[in-house]
C-alpha cells in the first residue's frame, strides 16, 4: 500500500516537473538556428529539445537496423546469431515435445507411434545420446531386432550411454539364446557399473549356468561389498558355489583340492546337506572319523536327511547291526521324534531283525504322515513278523498311491529333482532347491486307487494257501519294483531315495 502511494507521488512529481520545464522553455528567449542547403531554420527552446530527442531516437533505430542487417548476413553465412538461436530454440522445443510424446507412446505400448515420434525427435534434436535409446526401445517393441541392435551399437560410442548399449545388447543375446556372448557383455556391463544390482544378478546367474564358479564367487563378493546382499545370505551362497566348485574339481580327478573345497563349503554353511556329506567323506578319506561325525551331526540337527545317514554309516562300514543302532542313537538324539529319524531307526531295527522294536520305533507315522517309505517299512515289518501275503501286499498297495515324502523341490517353480544342484534344472534359478515335501499333485489317477481293492481282494483269495516267510531284503526289493512300476506311469520325476527303505543300512 505504501509503495503504491510512493509510485503515485513520483508519477505526479515527474508530470509536474515536465510541465514546469516545458513552460519555462516556452517563456525563454533565444533558440537554435540551423542552416540546411542555404535555408535557415530557427527553433525555439522547446522545439530544440524536441528535435534533440527525435534525433536520438532516429540514431538508435539506425543502429538497430544496421545490426539486424549484419546479423542477417552472418546467418546467411552460417554463423551463430540471434536469428539462428531463435530457430534452434524452436527446433529444440519441437524435438523435446516429440521425445516426450514418444516416451508416452512407449509406456502405453504403441510401438509404431513411439517409432514415429523417435524419428521426429531424432530429426529435430542433434543429440543421439538422447534419441537413440527411444529408437532402440521402440524398435524392440515393434520386433525390429536389427534396428534395435544397430541403435544399441551406436550408444557404445558415447561414454554416458555405453552401459545402456552394452545392457541392451546383452538382453538381445539372452533372448536369442546366445549365453556365451551374453556372459561377455554382462562382464563388460559389470565393469562399467559394478553397483548395478540387475547386472550383478544377471552376471551371477550366467556364471553359475556356465560353471564359472570362481567368477561367480567373485561376483558374489562384489554384491556383499556394495551392500546389495546380506552377509548371512552371502555366506550361504558362497558355500553353494564352493561346493559346486569342489564337485567340478573332484570330477577332474583332483581329490585333494576337492576335499579342501568341500570342507570350506561346509564351514561356510554347516546346514548345506550336500556340503556336509562331501566334507564328511573327505574326513573319512583322511581317517578323521571324529571330524566326519561332528560335521554330519551338525547338519542332521539342522535338517535330517537320508543321505546324511548314509554318510554316517560309511564312517564304520563293518560294524554289527547292534553296534550300528547304538552309534546312530547319538545322531538322532537331538530330534528323535522327527519322521526321518523314526524311519531311519526302524530300518536299523529291521536290519537287526528286531521287528517288534522296529514297529514301536515307527509308531503311528504310517497314519499321521503316510509316505511311500513309511508304508514300505510297515510292509517289511509285517513280512518279518510272519504276516500273510495279503497284509504285506495291502501295505505295498497303499505305498503306491502314498506321497513320496520330502524331496529336492525348487522354491521358485516347484520342480522336483532327484539330486541337489546349485541351479534348478527347470527354471534355472540359483540356490532355490530345498529338502521339503512337494505340493500335492493336481493330477489324479482315475484308475490307480480304484484298482487297489481288486489287487488286495485277489490276494485275499489266496490267503488260505501256505504262507512263505520271505527275508526282509526281498520285501524291500518287491516294494521297489512296485514303486518303479508307478514311476513309469507318472510324468513327474521321483526321488528314488525316498522310495527305498535305506537298503544301505538294512543290508549291512
Image (tube, rainbow, N blue to C red):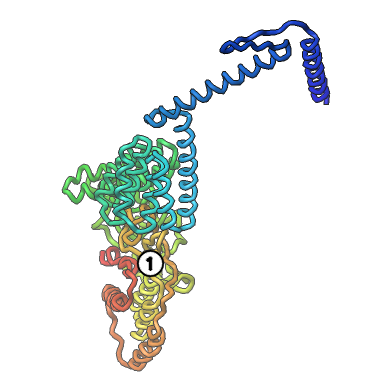
Q: Residue 44: image x %, image y %? A: 72, 11
Q: Residue 208: image x %, image y %? A: 30, 49
Q: Residue 422: image x %, image y %? A: 32, 53
Q: Which residue is mark 1?
A: 346
- The residue sitting at 22% across, 49% down in the picture is 248
Q: Residue 426: image x %, image y %? A: 33, 62
Quadrant holding the C terminus: bottom left
- In this rendering, the answer to whether 205 lies above or below 489 is above
**Secondary structure under the numbered disc 1 in the rendered image:** helix
Quadrant holding the N terminus: top right
User: Residue 410: in sight, yes or no?
Assistant: yes
Which residue lies most toward the left here?
253
- The residue sitting at 17% across, 49% down in the picture is 252
Observer-nearest of 181 and 420: 181
- In this rendering, the answer to whether 76 lies above or below 443 is above
- In this rendering, the answer to whether 434 lies above or below 67 is below
Within the image, what quadrant is residue 191 found in?
Answer: top left
Amino acid at each position: 500500500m505504501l509503495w503504491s502511494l510512493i509510485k503515485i507521488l513520483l508519477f505526479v512529481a515527474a508530470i509536474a516537473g515536465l510541465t514546469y520545464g516545458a513552460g519555462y522553455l516556452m517563456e525563454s528567449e533565444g533558440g537554435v538556428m540551423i542552416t540546411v542547403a542555404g535555408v535557415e531554420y530557427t527553433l525555439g527552446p522547446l522545439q530544440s529539445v524536441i528535435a534533440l530527442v527525435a534525433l536520438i531516437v532516429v540514431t538508435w533505430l539506425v543502429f538497430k537496423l544496421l545490426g539486424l542487417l549484419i546479423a542477417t548476413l552472418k546467418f546467411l553465412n552460417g554463423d551463430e546469431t540471434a536469428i539462428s538461436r531463435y530457430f534452434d530454440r524452436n527446433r529444440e522445443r519441437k524435438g523435446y515435445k516429440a521425445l516426450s510424446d514418444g516416451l508416452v507412446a512407449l509406456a502405453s505400448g504403441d510401438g509404431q507411434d513411439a517409432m514415429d515420434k523417435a524419428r521426429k525427435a531424432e530429426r529435430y534434436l542433434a543429440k543421439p545420446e538422447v534419441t537413440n535409446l527411444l529408437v532402440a526401445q521402440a524398435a524392440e517393441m515393434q520386433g525390429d531386432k536389427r534396428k534395435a541392435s544397430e541403435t544399441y551399437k551406436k550408444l557404445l560410442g558415447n561414454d554416458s550411454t555405453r552401459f545402456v548399449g552394452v545392457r541392451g545388447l546383452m538382453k538381445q543375446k539372452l533372448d536369442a539364446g546366445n549365453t556365451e556372448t551374453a556372459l561377455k557383455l554382462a562382464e563388460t556391463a559389470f565393469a562399467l557399473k559394478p553397483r548395478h544390482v540387475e547386472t550383478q544378478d544377471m552376471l551371477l546367474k550366467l556364471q553359475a549356468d556356465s560353471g564359472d564358479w570362481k567368477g561367480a564367487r567373485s561376483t558374489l563378493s562384489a554384491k556383499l561389498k556394495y551392500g546389495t546382499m546380506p552377509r548371512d545370505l552371502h555366506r550361504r551362497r558362497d558355500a553353494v558355489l564352493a561346493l559346486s566348485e569342489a564337485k567340478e574339481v573332484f570330477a577332474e580327478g583332483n581329490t585333494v583340492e576337492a576335499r579342501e573345497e568341500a570342507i570350506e563349503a561346509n564351514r561356510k554353511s554347516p546346514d548345506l546337506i550336500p556340503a556336509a556329506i562331501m566334507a564328511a567323506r573327505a574326513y573319512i578319506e583322511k581317517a578323521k572319523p571324529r571330524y566326519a561325525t561332528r560335521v554330519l551331526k551338525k547338519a542332521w540337527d539342522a535338517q535330517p536327511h537320508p543321505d546324511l545317514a548314509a554318510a554316517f554309516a560309511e564312517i564304520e562300514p563293518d560294524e554289527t547291526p547292534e553296534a550300528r543302532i547304538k552309534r546312530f542313537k547319538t545322531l538322532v538324539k537331538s530330534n528323535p521324534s522327527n519322521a526321518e529319524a523314526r524311519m531311519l531307526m526302524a530300518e536299523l531295527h529291521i536290519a537287526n531283525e528286531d521287528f517288534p522294536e522296529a514297529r514301536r520305533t515307527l509308531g503311528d507315522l504310517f497314519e499321521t504322515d503316510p509316505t511311500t517309505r513309511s508304508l514300505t517299512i510297515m510292509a517289511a515289518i509285517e513280512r518279518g513278523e510272519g504276516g500273510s501275503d495279503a497284509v504285506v501286499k495291502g501295505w505295498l498297495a497303499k505305498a503306491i498311491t502314498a506321497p513320496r515324502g520330502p524331496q529336492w523341490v525348487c522354491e521358485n517353480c516347484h520342480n522336483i529333482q532327484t539330486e541337489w544342484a546349485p541351479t534348478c534344472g527347470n527354471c534355472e534359478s540359483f540356490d532355490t532347491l530345498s529338502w521339503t515335501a512337494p505340493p500335492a499333485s493336481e493330477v489324479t489317477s482315475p484308475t490307480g486307487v480304484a484298482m487297489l481293492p481288486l489287487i488286495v481282494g485277489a490276494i485275499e483269495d489266496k490267503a488260505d494257501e501256505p504262507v512263505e516267510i520271505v527275508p526282509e531284503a526281498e520285501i524291500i526289493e518287491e516294494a521297489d519294483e512296485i514303486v518303479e512300476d508307478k514311476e513309469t506311469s507318472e510324468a513327474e520325476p521321483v526321488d528314488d531315495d525316498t522310495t527305498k527303505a535305506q537298503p544301505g543300512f538294512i543290508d549291512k
